[in-house]
Image (cartoon, rainbow, N blue to C red):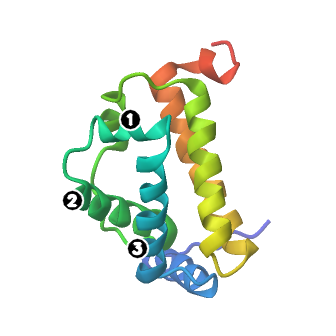
């Protein structure tokens, strides 16, 4: 078996090239975040959870854009701690993660340049949701036993 050692810069360039190939750039990230979170804020279940915690939506949306740019394009602009931030949310139920993911997918399907872009984001969003759910609820919420 042959292993290829790549520098961090080569890996970042590969990720950025792949994102560009999928039509992912700062403008797309901005549209995704703005559209998706407008829907979250208006959602009958998710809206009260997020609106009850977030006081400055423009500032929060800017952080979310940096977060998703870092996730999708390895932009390196996000330096927050999403798990502690989400631990403050009250009243989160297991099914809320599915609602969030469903709304995210619906938004992606409507605005993405193609199905590969939807799949790219949904893989990452599902991992993020699972990680947050695990951190917030523990292994039991995922149907596993420790």
- Residue 70 lies, in percent from the top left, at 41, 66
Q: Earlier in the sequence, mark 3 or mark 1?
A: 3
Q: Residue 30 carries which label?
A: 3
The residue lying furthest to the right in this view is 1
Q: Earlier in the sequence, mark 1 or mark 2?
A: 1
Circle nearer the viewer, 3 or 1: 1
Circle nearer the viewer, 1 or 2: 1
> Is any atom of residue 43 visible in this view?
yes
Q: Residues within 10 Å of mark 1 (few under 14, many from 20)?
A: some
Disc 3 versus disc 1: distance between alpha carbons?
A: 23 Å
Q: Earlier in the sequence, mark 2 or mark 3?
A: 3
The image quadrant of residue 77 is bottom left
Q: How crowded is mark 3: few (under 14 residues within 10 Å), some or many (20 or more)?
A: some
> Is any atom of residue 8 visible in this view?
no
The image quadrant of residue 15 is bottom right
Q: Does residue 105 lie above or below 99 as drawn?
A: below
In the picture, which quadrant includes the N terminus? bottom right
- Residue at 60% across, 40% down: 99
- Compared across the picture, whether 72 is left or right of 58 comes to right
**Circle 1 SS class:** helix
- Compared across the picture, whether 28 is left or right of 5 comes to left
Q: Which mark is residue 59?
A: 2
The residue singled out by tag 1 in the image is: 48
**Circle 3 SS class:** helix
- Residue 50 lies, in percent from the top left, at 36, 40
Q: Does residue 6 lie above or below 21 as drawn?
A: above
- Residue at 50% across, 20% down: 137
Q: Does residue 26 lie above or below 69 as drawn?
A: below
Q: Residue 35 carries which label?
A: none
């Amino acid at each position: 078996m042959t292993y290829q050692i790549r520098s961090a810069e080569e890996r970042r360039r590969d990720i950025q090239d792949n994102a560009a190939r999928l039509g992912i750039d700062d403008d797309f990230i901005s549209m995704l975040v703005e559209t998706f979170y407008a829907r979250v804020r208006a959602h009958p279940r998710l809206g009260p959870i997020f609106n009850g915690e977030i006081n400055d939506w423009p500032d929060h949306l800017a952080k979310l854009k940096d977060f998703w740019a870092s996730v999708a394009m390895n932009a390196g602009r996000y330096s927050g701690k999403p798990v502690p931030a989400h631990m403050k949310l009250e009243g989160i139920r297991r099914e809320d993660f599915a609602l969030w993911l469903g709304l995210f997918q619906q938004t992606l399907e409507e605005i993405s340049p193609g199905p590969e872009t939807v799949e790219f984001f949904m893989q990452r969003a599902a991992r993020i949701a699972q990680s947050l759910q695990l951190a917030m609820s523990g292994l039991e919420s995922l149907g596993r036993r420790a």
